[in-house]
């Protein structure tokens, strides 16, 4: 076909998709504001605004214009593997998925989620599950409708999971989790028989401003770019993207516990760096995003845990931590601090859980989500089901729903199918890190010098730059020559915790 005509078709297609991206990013900006600065009284009007933008974006994506532009380029023979060809493939995929969901269901989900989020916050603050329960019932009903509209072969959870982790299945995740649980529980039990590290000093006083500065300084050292990013406070930390040149993170700080603010900042900076690393050629295309949430989480977990909880990291940063928090840390040795930030103890709150027991928190949610969707448990039974499951998996029972079933924002947003990606991210992070360690043999020395540029460059080159052009499975195959598996992560924790807790 004539190159001029082809480039005209590409240009029309790009302009059309760019408008969809602009609407999505504008909605994301309103959502970011909702979580950070918006007065609580604005919840209802904000819900309508977000719903309008999301609906407009959905209408554009599912329009006849998209269909005809995609069909034209599919038949025009774009060069396979080119950005244009990859873009058409992804738009086709998103189009297929989106056309299955009726526009009014999308609008209902967005509006219900925005209202539900407010109810969840109130319920959590007041420890009253009943305030959230009717919203959750509505959310579950809408998620079921969504799954039915998307259609599935075996499990209702499959199409919901696919939104966040394309290419996997409920059965596969269940199998991975079973293997993981089998290996993990004995390790956690073994650790429980060892004397626990002293960590009282982590719960003394860490002034807010000093925490903010220390955490953000480390994120900047990692390579989180403040020219194209910023950090703000929110109740539930997250990262969000309005363009490749505007990738924001949030954090929350507890002045009486060092871990949430600091490790939360490292975590979100890992997400942020992924998005900042997407090739600028992909700006205003549907390729400019992380390829899956599991891959996204592999990045945040790598910076938070594999780097931020490593001995090398603290050999460099501990003197700085002591200078930043003299009141809390002046009499604490580096070794004691390192052991304390790696303490393993079953606890109630997922985001504060240690590296090991974290995955058990995810399994509780994964199972309950499926049972709720399949109507095997009712919303009214959820708090006690949650508490029972926590007791059986982690040996701890929440005293309040705020520390139990109400702790996470995800269900209020309608994000059923999201939680498993956290645990998958842990597994992927370790598989990738093994490979980086081969590519950069002196990586531990570099970390001990506070130097992360080679590591970030490797992640950029093999993962970030592609956005959605490569699937998570493809990236794993190409970088590690293997599929998703538990071995690498199990090996990592066995080695690390043997040294930490061994004799
Ligand atoms: Zn994350």
Image: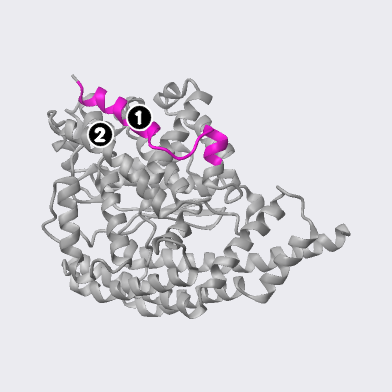
- Would you say residue 218 is visible in this rendering? no
- Would you say residue 176 is visible in this rendering? yes
| Residue where numbered disc 2 is placed | 342
In this picture, is 65 found above or below 321? below
From the top left corner, tell me how far across and down residue 173 is, in percent.
39, 49
Secondary structure found at label 1: helix
Image mark for residue 492: 1
In this picture, is 24 found above or below 266? below
> Dot 2, crowdedness within 10 Å: few (<14), some or many (≥20)?
many
Q: CA distance from mark 2 to mark 1?
A: 13 Å
Q: Answer left or right for 194 relative to 72.
A: left
Quadrant in the picture for the C terminus: top left
Magenta-colored stretch includes residue 484 = yes
Magenta-colored stretch includes residue 133 = no
Residue beneath the point at 31% across and 55% down? 366
> Dot 1, crowdedness within 10 Å: few (<14), some or many (≥20)?
some
In this picture, is 271 found above or below 385? above
**Residue 195: which quarter of the image?**
top left
In this picture, is 316 found above or below 136? above
From the top left corner, tell me how far across and down residue 167 is, in percent.
51, 52
Task: Confirm or reject: label 2 Cβ below 8 Å from ligand 1.
Answer: no
Count of marks, rendered view: 2
Q: Residues in magenta?
A: 475-502
Q: Answer left or right for 74 relative to 22.
A: right
From the top left corner, tell me how far across and down residue 295 is, in percent.
47, 46
**Residue 357: which quarter of the image?**
top left
Q: Nearer the viewer, residue 202 or 94?
A: 94
Q: How is the image coloured?
A: one colour
Q: Nearer the viewer, residue 462 or 200?
A: 462
From the top left corner, tell me how far across and down residue 480 is, in percent.
52, 33
């Amino acid at each position: 076909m004539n190159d001029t005509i082809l480039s005209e078709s590409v240009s029309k297609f790009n302009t059309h998709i760019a408008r969809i991206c602009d609407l999505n990013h504008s909605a994301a900006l309103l959502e970011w504001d909702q979580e950070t600065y918006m007065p609580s009284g604005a919840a209802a009007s904000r819900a309508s605004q977000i719903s309008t933008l999301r609906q407009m974006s959905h209408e554009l994506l599912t329009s006849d214009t998209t269909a005809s532009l995609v069909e034209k380029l599919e038949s025009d023979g774009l060069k396979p593997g080119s950005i244009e060809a990859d873009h058409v493939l992804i738009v086709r995929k998103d189009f297929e998925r989106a056309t299955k969901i009726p526009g009014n269901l999308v609008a209902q989900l967005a509006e219900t989620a925005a209202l539900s989020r407010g109810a969840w916050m109130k319920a959590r603050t007041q420890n009253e599950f009943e305030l959230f329960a009717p919203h959750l019932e509505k959310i579950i009903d809408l998620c079921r409708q969504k799954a039915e509209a998307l259609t599935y072969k075996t499990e209702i959870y499959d199409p919901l999971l696919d939104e966040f982790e394309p290419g996997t299945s409920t059965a596969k995740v269940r199998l991975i989790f079973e293997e993981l649980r089998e290996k993990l529980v004995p390790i956690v039990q073994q650790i429980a028989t060892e004397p626990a590290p002293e960590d009282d000093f982590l719960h003394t006083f860490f002034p807010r401003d000093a925490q903010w500065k220390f955490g953000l300084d480390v994120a900047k050292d990692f390579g989180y770019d403040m020219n194209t990013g910023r950090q703000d406070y929110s109740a539930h930390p997250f990262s969000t993207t309005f363009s490749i040149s505007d990738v924001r993170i949030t954090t929350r700080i507890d002045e009486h516990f060092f871990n949430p603010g600091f490790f939360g900042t490292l975590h979100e900076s890992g997400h942020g760096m992924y998005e900042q690393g997407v090739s600028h050629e992909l700006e205003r295309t549907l390729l400019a995003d992380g390829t899956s949430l599991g891959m996204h989480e592999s990045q945040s977990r790598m910076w938070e845990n594999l780097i931020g909880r490593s001995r090398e990291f603290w050999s460099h940063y501990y003197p700085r931590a002591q200078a930043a928090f003299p009141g809390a840390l002046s009499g604490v040795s580096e070794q004691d601090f390192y052991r304390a930030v790696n303490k393993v103890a079953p606890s109630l709150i997922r985001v504060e859980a240690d590296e090991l027991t974290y995955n058990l928190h995810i399994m509780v949610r994964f199972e309950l989500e499926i049972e709720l969707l399949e109507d095997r448990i009712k919303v009214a039974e959820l708090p006690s089901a949650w508490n029972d499951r926590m007791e059986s998996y982690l040996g701890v029972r929440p005293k309040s729903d705020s520390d139990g079933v109400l702790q996470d924002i995800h269900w209020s947003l309608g994000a059923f199918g999201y939680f498993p990606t956290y645990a998958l991210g842990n597994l992927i992070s370790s598989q990738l890190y093994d490979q980086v360690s081969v590519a950069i043999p002196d990586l531990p020395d570099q970390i001990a010098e506070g130097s992360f540029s080679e590591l970030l460059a490797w992640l950029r080159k093999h993962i970030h730059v592609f956005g959605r052009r490569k699937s998570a499975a493809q990236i794993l195959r190409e970088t590690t020559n293997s599929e998703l598996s538990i071995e690498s992560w199990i090996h990592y924790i066995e080695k690390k915790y043997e040294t930490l807790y061994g004799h």
